[in-house]
Amino acid sequence: LYASSELNAGGVRATWWCEPNVASCRDTIAFFEAHADEVSLRQRGYLWLYDDVEKLARARERRAFQERLGVRVDLLEPAEVAKRFALLDRNLDEIRGATFSPRDGLVNPNAVRRLYRERASAGGARFLNRHYVEGVEVGEAEPGRRRVERVHVVEVQKGAPADESGLLRRILTQHRVEPDAGLDHPSLRPEIFVNALGAWSPLLSARLGVRDWAVPVRRQIAMVDVRERDL
């Protein structure tokens, strides 16, 4: 019911600020490079502009471990920014410097999801599409550790009666299924349970009785048509 893949811009970058993120994204980029046509990889690079001297200094410090982990990051002076990126022809007098990571870029997020799903299905994975976790039974595996014993899910098909009755909207906005909804509630007994809901993971973590550190942040994406240079 939730599909973040359709909502994100498909940005791919390894210019992060902690080593686990840099290393994992570096390897992800290498995978995308090996499947560039399948995921529509466009390595145009990421350009970070700095108008603050202290932030630029921190970027220089981060560059040391980024390059140590195999991620190329170029340091650019203001004059070089104007020379390499002619599109930026305004307010360059405010720029103190920049970094540019040429292996970063964009992918088609839906193509990435399709590739992963196809590979997972070929390996024996089974997907339950349009299912919502309605409840979770948790037991104690050992002192201090919980185990998910059973997961109750409900299938919600788009169209009647879910849409006409308002059930689908209620589930998406209120995150609950009414007892008299008249839908089947099959259950699963997982050996391993992974909460991979991203921005919505706190909703499920609350059902498990565990604290979730994920904080959803609303973003905006503007689609524009950019020619070689806007005169």
Image (spheres, helix red, strand yellow):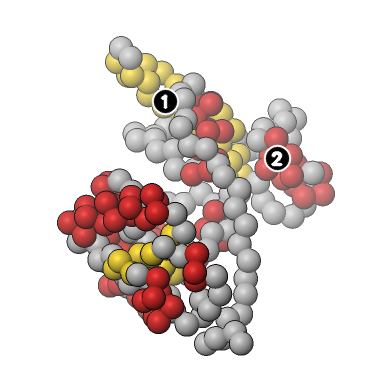
Q: Would you call the spot at circle 2 few (<14 residues within 10 Å), some (14-19), or many (20 or more)?
A: few
Residue kind at label 1, given as amino acid type: Glu
Q: Residue furthest top?
A: 143
Can residue 5 be seen? yes
What label sits on residue 102 in the rendered view? none
Name the residue located 65 percent from the left edge and 35 percent from the top edge.
Answer: 175
Name the residue located 56 percent from the left edge and 29 percent from the top edge.
Answer: 135
Q: On the image, numbered disc 2 is attached to which residue? A: 173
* Residue 56 placement (x, y as % from top left): 37, 55
* Residue 181 placement (x, y as % from top left): 73, 35
The residue mark sitting in front, 1 or 2, is 2
76 sits left or right of 219 in the view: left
Q: Residue furthest left?
A: 68
Q: Are marks 1 and 2 in contact (CB under 8 Å)?
A: no
Q: On the image, numbered disc 1 is attached to which residue? A: 149
Q: Is residue 175 above or below residue 231?
A: above
Q: Is residue 74 above or below residue 89?
A: above
Name the residue located 53 percent from the left edge and 26 percent from the top edge.
Answer: 206
